[in-house]
């Protein structure tokens, strides 16, 4: 069974994080939310407290297949400031394991050199941070083991792209139909 870890830092964009969690779990993908703040309750960018499944120190990186970074401010900055997360992200990227980010969070991939020569997208005001990328306005860009997306309004196609990665196109289309995604 595939396993996805979705990281929550203070100020994360709740729709971008929880839409991925919801869609992955509906598809049968084991998905854990991981708090990087040292406390399981993490407050979103809109003041909504969310209880993470595990603390960063408890996360099972050895059995994880994908790391997902939601955007939001200051959530994206707080994710990037988490050195142990950046170490895990680098290890995943270098091993060719899947890394995904949405909204402002693809800027982290740009800063770390993951986007050189790749099609990538992000929230419009962060496009300049996609260092080395062929910047796209597509809702989602999948480039080998790197997936990026533009923002809250693209959270469903982003989540469905992750489902497609692990469960196939047919399952993603079935799920889109089931949630009445037009």
Image (cartoon, rainbow, N blue to C red):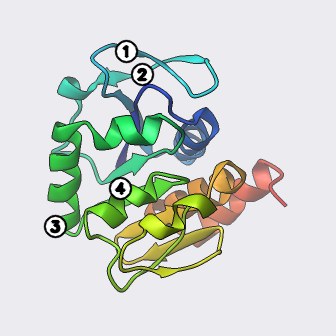
Q: Which numbered disc, 1 or 4, marks the residue that appears first in the sequence?
A: 1
User: Callout 2 environment at 10 Å: few (<14), some (14 to 19), or many (20+)?
Assistant: some
- Compute the Cα span from label 1 to label 4: 23 Å
Q: Is residue 181 left or right of residue 32?
A: right
Q: Closer to the observer: label 4 or label 2?
A: 4
Q: Which residue is denoted by mark 1 in the rendering?
A: 40
User: Callout 3 environment at 10 Å: few (<14), some (14 to 19), or many (20+)?
Assistant: few
Q: Closer to the observer: label 1 or label 4?
A: 4
Q: Is residue 76 above or below residue 168?
A: above
Q: Which numbered disc, 4 or 3, marks the residue that appears first in the sequence?
A: 3
Q: Residue at x 51, y 45 (%)?
A: 71
Q: Residue at x 43, y 65 (%)?
A: 129
Q: Which mark is residue 52?
A: 2
Which residue is more in the foreground, 160 or 93? 93
x and y percentages locating residue 103 in the rendered image = 55, 53
Q: Which numbered disc, 2 or 1, marks the residue that appears first in the sequence?
A: 1
Q: Which residue is denoted by mark 3 in the rendering?
A: 94
**Circle 2 SS class:** loop
**Circle 1 SS class:** loop
Q: Residue at x 61, y 18 (%)?
A: 47
**Circle 4 SS class:** helix
The answer to whether the residue labelled 2 contacts the one labelled 1, judged by CB atoms less than 8 Å apart, is yes
x and y percentages locating residue 152 in the rendered image = 67, 48
**Quadrant occupied by the C terminus:** bottom right
Q: Residue at x 35, y 74 (%)?
A: 115
Q: Is residue 85 left or right of residue 13?
A: left
Q: Closer to the observer: label 4 or label 3?
A: 4
Q: Which mark is residue 108?
A: 4
Residue 161 visible in the shown view: yes
- Compute the Cα span from label 4 to label 3: 15 Å
């Amino acid at each position: 069974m595939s396993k996805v870890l979705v990281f929550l830092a203070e100020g994360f964009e709740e729709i971008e994080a929880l839409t991925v969690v919801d869609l992955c779990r509906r598809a049968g993908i084991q998905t854990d939310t991981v708090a990087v703040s040292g406390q399981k309750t993490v407050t979103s960018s809109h003041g909504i407290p969310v209880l993470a499944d595990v603390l960063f120190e408890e996360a099972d990186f050895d059995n994880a297949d994908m790391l997902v970074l939601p955007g939001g401010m200051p959530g994206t900055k707080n994710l990037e400031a988490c050195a142990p997360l950046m170490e895990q992200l680098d290890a995943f990227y270098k091993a060719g394991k899947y890394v995904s980010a949405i909204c402002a969070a693809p800027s982290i991939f740009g800063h770390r050199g993951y986007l050189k020569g790749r099609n990538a997208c992000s929230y419009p005001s962060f496009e300049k941070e996609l260092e080395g990328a062929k910047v796209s306005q597509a809702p989602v860009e999948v480039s080998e083991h790197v997936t990026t997306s533009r923002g809250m309004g693209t959270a469903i196609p982003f989540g469905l792209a992750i489902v497609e990665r692990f469960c196939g196109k047919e399952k993603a289309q079935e799920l889109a139909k089931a949630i009445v995604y037009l």
